[in-house]
Image: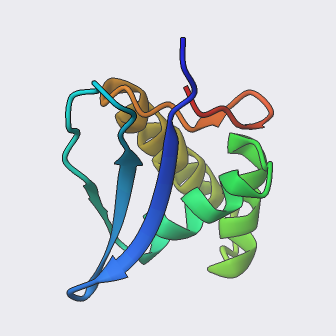
C-alpha cells in the first residue's frame, strides 16, 4: 500500500485536512476541522499517541477533574475513529501512521 500524504491548511475561517493525491488516485474531498481537530492533527504529526494527545488537551484546556479529562479522551478517540472511517488513519498506536 502506497503511503498517503496529508496537508493541513487554514482557509475561509476553518482548518482543512487534504489528502494529496498520487497519479491515478481518486480525489478525496478535504475534511473540515475546528481548531481542536487541527491541534490534534498537529500533535499526531509530532509523534504523539492518542493518550498523549488527550493528556495535552487536558492541560491546554485546564481540565480540573478526572471526568473532564475522561470526556476529552473520549473525544480524541472518536476523532481518531472518524479519521479511520474516512480511510484517513493518521493517529495510530505510536504517533502518526499515514496510510
Question: Along the horizontal axis of the image, is 49 left or right of 30?
Answer: right
**Is 12 above or below relative to 34?**
below
The residue closer to the viewer here, 38 or 16, is 16
Measuring from the top left, give residue 40's x and y in whole percent: 57, 60
Residue at position x 40%, y 37% from top?
Answer: 83
The residue closer to the viewer here, 79 or 22, is 22
Measuring from the top left, give residue 72's x and y in whole percent: 55, 56
Q: In the figure, residue 58 lies in which quadrant?
A: bottom right
Measuring from the top left, give residue 2's x and y in whole percent: 54, 19
**Is 15 above or below relative to 13?**
above
Residue at position x 64%, y 58% from top?
Answer: 69
The residue closer to the viewer here, 9 or 24, is 24
Q: Is residue 68 visible?
A: no
Residue at position x 42%, y 34% from top?
Answer: 88
Residue at position x 21%, y 28% from top?
Answer: 26
Outermost residue toward the bottom? 13
Measuring from the top left, give residue 5's x and y in whole percent: 52, 43
Outermost residue toward the top? 1
Q: In which quarter of the image is the N terminus?
A: top right
Amino acid at each position: 500500500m502506497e503511503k498517503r500524504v496529508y496537508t493541513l491548511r487554514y482557509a475561509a475561517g476553518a482548518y482543512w485536512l487534504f489528502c494529496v493525491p498520487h497519479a491515478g488516485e481518486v480525489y478525496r474531498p478535504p475534511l473540515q476541522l475546528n481548531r481542536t481537530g487541527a491541534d490534534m492533527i498537529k500533535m499526531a504529526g509530532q509523534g504523539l499517541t492518542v493518550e498523549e494527545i488527550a493528556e495535552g488537551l487536558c492541560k491546554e484546556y485546564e481540565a480540573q477533574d478526572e471526568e473532564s479529562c475522561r470526556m476529552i479522551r473520549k473525544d480524541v478517540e472518536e476523532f481518531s475513529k472518524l479519521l479511520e472511517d474516512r480511510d484517513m488513519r493518521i493517529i495510530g498506536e505510536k504517533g502518526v501512521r499515514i496510510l
